[in-house]
């Protein structure tokens, strides 16, 4: 079935799927609305109205709202790792600096007036049921982040890499939530500094 990874003209149930342009418009609008207002709060009618397409066009590209939500999160996931990988590439061979660079950017984003936290975390809260398409994408993102942080902690020479990696993950998740609660001047702005203090205390002496 067509997804955001493979939006092409195909035949499904005897009908031509929506062209790439329409599918992209739908996904772009859904991405904006889902992130700003939450997935459950947005109906299909509002999405198609804002995208300027018909409801059949939406369902030919995204068989259900759940699949559209998963497609939004898959795009969010790609962008998330692009940001993470940029921080890693900027400091080759230096995981401590890589984490600091990534979290410095996270801290800055939390200070924006339109900040709504992490789309993955928000989706996991909205969909507690395991196996839901949106939940599956969110869980995979968080599991990968945990894995990477633990590996980076080990590369730094931490006494207990798994505990440090998990501690960094807890700091990151805390920044995502507190950024929405406190906004400008809130504690999330110092997430990189707090991460560095945790790292320093966890390294082998």
Image (cartoon, helix red, strand yellow):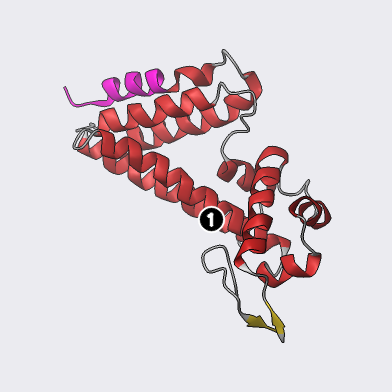
Front-most of 128 and 134? 134
Front-most of 191 and 16? 16
The residue sitting at 51% across, 33% down in the picture is: 173
- Residue 120: which quarter of the image? top right
The residue sitting at 70% across, 72% down in the picture is: 60
Q: Is residue 88 above or below residue 43?
A: above
- Residue 167: which quarter of the image? top left
Q: Is residue 48 above or below residue 149?
A: below
Residue placed farthest to the bottom in the image? Answer: 14
Residue placed farthest to the top in the image? Answer: 185
Q: Is residue 20 above or below residue 103?
A: below
Q: Give the labeled residue for mark 1.
A: 74
State the quadrant of the C terminus. Answer: top left
For the stretch drawn in magenta, what is the main secondary structure?
A: helix
Span colored in magenta: 192-205
Front-most of 97 and 49? 49
Q: Position of residue 95 (x, y in %)?
A: 25, 34
State the quadrant of the N terminus. Answer: bottom right
């Amino acid at each position: 079935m067509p997804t955001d990874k493979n939006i092409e003209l195909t035949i499904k149930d005897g009908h031509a799927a929506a062209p790439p342009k329409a599918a992209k418009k739908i996904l772009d609008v859904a991405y904006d609305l889902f992130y700003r207002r939450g997935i459950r709060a947005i109906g299909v009618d509002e999405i198609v109205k804002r995208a300027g397409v018909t409801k059949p066009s939406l369902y030919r590209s995204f068989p259900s709202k759940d699949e559209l939500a998963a497609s939004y999160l898959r795009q969010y996931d790609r962008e998330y790792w692009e940001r993470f990988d940029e921080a890693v590439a900027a400091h080759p061979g230096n995981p401590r600096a890589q984490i600091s660079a990534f979290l410095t950017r996270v801290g800055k984003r939390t200070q924006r007036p339109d900040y709504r936290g992490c789309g993955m975390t928000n989706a996991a809260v909205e969909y507690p049921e395991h196996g839901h398409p949106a939940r599956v994408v969110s869980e995979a993102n968080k599991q990968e982040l945990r894995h990477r942080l633990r590996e980076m902690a080990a590369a730094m020479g931490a006494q207990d890499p798994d505990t440090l990696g998990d501690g960094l993950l807890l700091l990151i998740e805390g920044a995502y939530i507190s950024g929405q609660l406190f906004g400008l001047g809130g504690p999330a702005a110092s997430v990189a500094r707090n991460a560095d203090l945790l790292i320093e205390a966890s390294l082998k002496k």
